[in-house]
Image (spheres, rainbow, N blue to C red):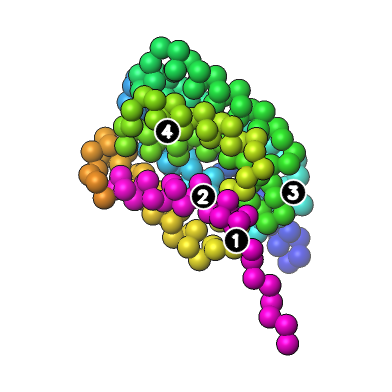
Amino acid sequence: MGEQTAMDIRIKALSVHLLTASGAVLSMFAMLAAVESEWSLMFLWLVLALIVDGIDGPLARRYEVEKNFPIYDGVLMDLIVDYLTYVFIPAYALFKSGMLTGWTGWLAMIAITYGSVVYFADTRMKTKDKSFSGFPACWNMVVLVLFAVQPSQWVALIIVIALTAGMFLNLKFIHPTRTKRWNWISLPVSLVWVLAAAWAAWTNFEAGWLAHWALIFASLYLILAGIAQQIIPERGPKSV
C-alpha cells in the first residue's frame, strides 16, 4: 500500500512537470499564429499558456515535485517556457505588428528581449513575501493591453521603456497567487484580467469599452499594488 502511494505521488509530480512543459507547445502555436499576423489567435494561445502557468505552480508545491520527481528541474523548465510566452513572442508581435515603427520598434524589441533575459537570471528576483523585485517581465500582458487599447506610438514606447527600467529598480510587484497580502482582491482582479484578455482576443480586440477598461484597471492594480505595499506599512498583530 505504501509503495502504491509513493508511486501515485511520483506520477502526479511527473504530471505537473509535463503540464509545465506543455507551455512550450502553446508557445509554438502562438508563434505560428504571430508569423501569419493572426494576433488574436496568438494572444488566445498566450492567455491559455498564462492559465497553465498559473495552475502548475500551486500543483508543483502541492505534490512537492522537487522531492517526488527531481529528475526534471521544474523551475528551469518554467523559466524557459516563460521567456518564450512572456517575452520573446510578445516582443516579436509588438515589432511585427507595426504598432511601433522604425527605430522605435527596434528599440522596444531589443529592450524587452535583452532586459528580460538579464532579469530572468537575477537571483534576487523573488522577495520574502513571494512577490517580485522589479517588474517581472510580463510582456505578454503588457502587449495584449497595448493591442486592445491602441495607444499612440510614443505612449506605447514610453510604457515599454519605463517597464524595462522597472525590472531593475527596487520596486515590488505582487505575484497574483503567491503574495498573501491583499490576496483577497489580487486573485479576483487577476481573474478579471484573464477573462477580459481572453474576450478581447476572441473578439479580435473589438470587445468594446467594458473589456478594455477592465483590462486597464486590472493591469494598473497588478502593476501598482506591490509598490503600494512598499509605501503602506503592514499592520502587525495587536498587542494585548
Task: Find out whether residue 221 is within the magenta segment.
Answer: yes
Pointer 4 with pointer 2, Cβ within 8 A = no
Q: Which residues are magenta?
A: 211-240
Give the amino acid at mark 4: Val
Residue 161 drawn at (x, y percent): 52, 28
Residue labelled with disc 2: 224
Let me know if residue 16 appears in the view.
Answer: no
Residue at 75%, 39% in the rendered image: 123
Residue labelled with disc 3: 66
Residue 192 drawn at (x, y percent): 39, 54
Q: Earlier in the sequence, mark 2 or mark 3?
A: 3
Give the amino acid at mark 3: Glu
How far is mark 4 from mark 3, CA to CA? 33 Å
Q: Nearer the viewer, mark 4 or mark 3?
A: 4
Residue 188 drawn at (x, y percent): 44, 60
Give the amino acid at mark 1: Ile
Residue at 77%, 52% in the rendered image: 67
Residue labelled with disc 4: 143
Q: Is residue 133 left or right of residue 221?
A: right
Residue 39 drawn at (x, y percent): 34, 28
How far is mark 4 from mark 2, CA to CA? 17 Å
Number of numbered discs: 4
How far is mark 2 from mark 1, CA to CA? 12 Å
